[in-house]
Image: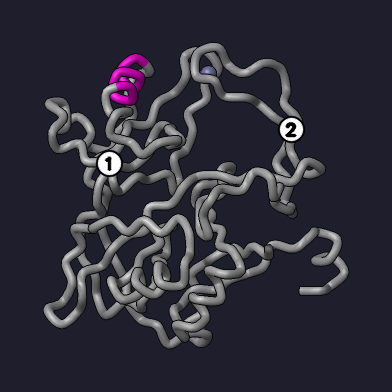
Amino acid sequence: MRYYLLRLITDLAATTVRWSATGRRRWGLPGTECPECGGGGGGVGLDYPSADLSSLPEEREYRRARLAPWDEYVRLRDLCSPFLPPGAVVEPGMGMGPLVGRVRGRPPQVAMDGVWHLYAQPEGVERLVTAGLRGIKPEPTALNVSRDVPPLLELELLVAGDYALKYRPEPLGEPCPICGIQQTTEAPYLWELDEASLPEADVFRFFHHPGCIIASERFVEVLRGMGDTGIRATEIVPPAAREAGAL
Ligand SMILES: [Zn+2]
């Protein structure tokens, strides 16, 4: 199976798609700094739109993006964990709940914005599901749309996958005893996926860079069948092939 990186096409000459979404996540974990190693995590792309904190008495504490002391972060992290999907990767700055804001224009059936979100119109979800693609989990947004535009859904993605063994960074020392962060050698610039690490999903976020959305050949085929979606799919090929100019 071939795998592809999905990215928004930003060159306006290369796509006729014109739409935009502006919004913020309803809830989120604060950023923090580990008192032992100083690590913080970034949380870029780490969002769980299905996590509904509205029944949590402390819900308001998740509304404002901020930096918090480590102990406060741990308390909020532990309180919200029952609301997260199974196997969720949790980091400081992680987002939860729907995106709240507005959409301008008419998004294509499957759409990306300039950040790291993957959206679908109800019709797009149906096409993905009908094609038998795995890991399609549409969640509602609170993004206002024009009256003649269908509501926009967001696809909640698993965070998974690893570098193939020969590209995998080496651990340096032991993981931090407080936050668990493992220091490693530098991450590779060019890499391949380890097939054995892949989830039961045709689209997911890469574990090492959750802002990076990876799709299977089957997903990309369905996406291309939708015409111009403003999304570019770039195949993940062995670095040797890339250097030889095969791409
Ligand atoms: Zn630490």
Q: Is residue 155 left or right of residue 102?
A: right
Numbered circle sitting on residue 51: 1
The residue shown at (27%, 62%) is 22
Name the kind of residue labelled 1 in the image. Ala
Judged left or right of residue 177, residue 149 is left
Q: Is residue 106 magenta?
A: no
Q: Which mark is residue 185?
A: 2
**Percent coordinates x, y for residue 3 in the rendering:** 64, 62
Q: Secondary structure at mark 2?
A: loop
Quarter of the figure with residue 115:
bottom left
Q: What residue sits 18% from the left and 72% below the top? A: 145
Image quadrant in which you'd find residue 130: bottom left
Specify whether tag 2 is near ligand 1 (CB below 8 Å).
no
Q: Secondary structure at mark 1?
A: loop
The boundaries of the magenta stretch are: 71-78
**Residue at coordinates 56% horizontally, 58% vertically from top-left?**
214
